[in-house]
Image (cartoon, grey):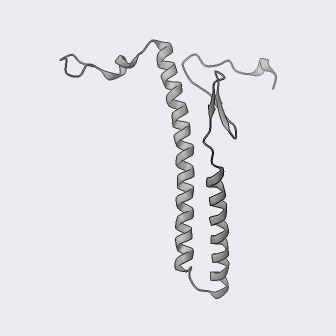
Amino acid sequence: MPAAQLKPPADDGERGVDRNVRQTTDCDGEVYEQPDMSNLDANIKRKQRQVAKARVGSRKSGKPLSNRARRVCGQLRKLHRRKRRRRENAAINILDRGRSLIRQARGEGASARRGTFGTGQPR
């Protein structure tokens, strides 16, 4: 797409995020590292193979999943939850950094967020 057709960045503090495999870049060009999930991905693949093997056995025999297979399914769900949490945590941290940068640009410091508790003055 030609540069002339691109929309200019928003002046109201909105931020765009470009997600890559290992890093995330915001519209200001700041680069954030993504969490390394190679071990987690390997564990998920291993558990998926175990679940597939157990399901083939249960389909052939016509019986429900064995206790071992049910346990492995639970472990797989747990690994997927862990991966989702890591991804969400990284995204939230990027957004929090962006919000703090916007506050700094507007001149709002930490005192503007804390309020005046205990001084008898409203927030």
Please name whichever residue, 14 or 25, is drawn nearer the observer in this view of the structure.
Answer: 25
Q: Is residue 4 left or right of residue 86?
A: right
Say if residue 18 shows up in the picture.
no
Q: In the rendered view, would you say 54 is above or below 28?
A: below
x%, y% of residue 73?
56, 68
* Residue found at the very far bottom of the displayed protein: 61
x%, y% of residue 96?
49, 30
Residue drawn at point x = 60 percent, y = 19 percent:
10
Q: In the rendered view, would you say 66 is above or below 51?
A: below
Residue drawn at point x = 57 percent, y = 63 percent:
76
Say if residue 29 shows up in the picture.
yes
The quadrant the N terminus occupies is top right
Residue drawn at point x = 69 percent, y = 37 percent:
20
The quadrant the C terminus occupies is top left
x%, y% of residue 35?
60, 42
Query: Which quarter of the figure has residue 66?
Result: bottom right
Query: Which quarter of the figure has residue 63?
Result: bottom right
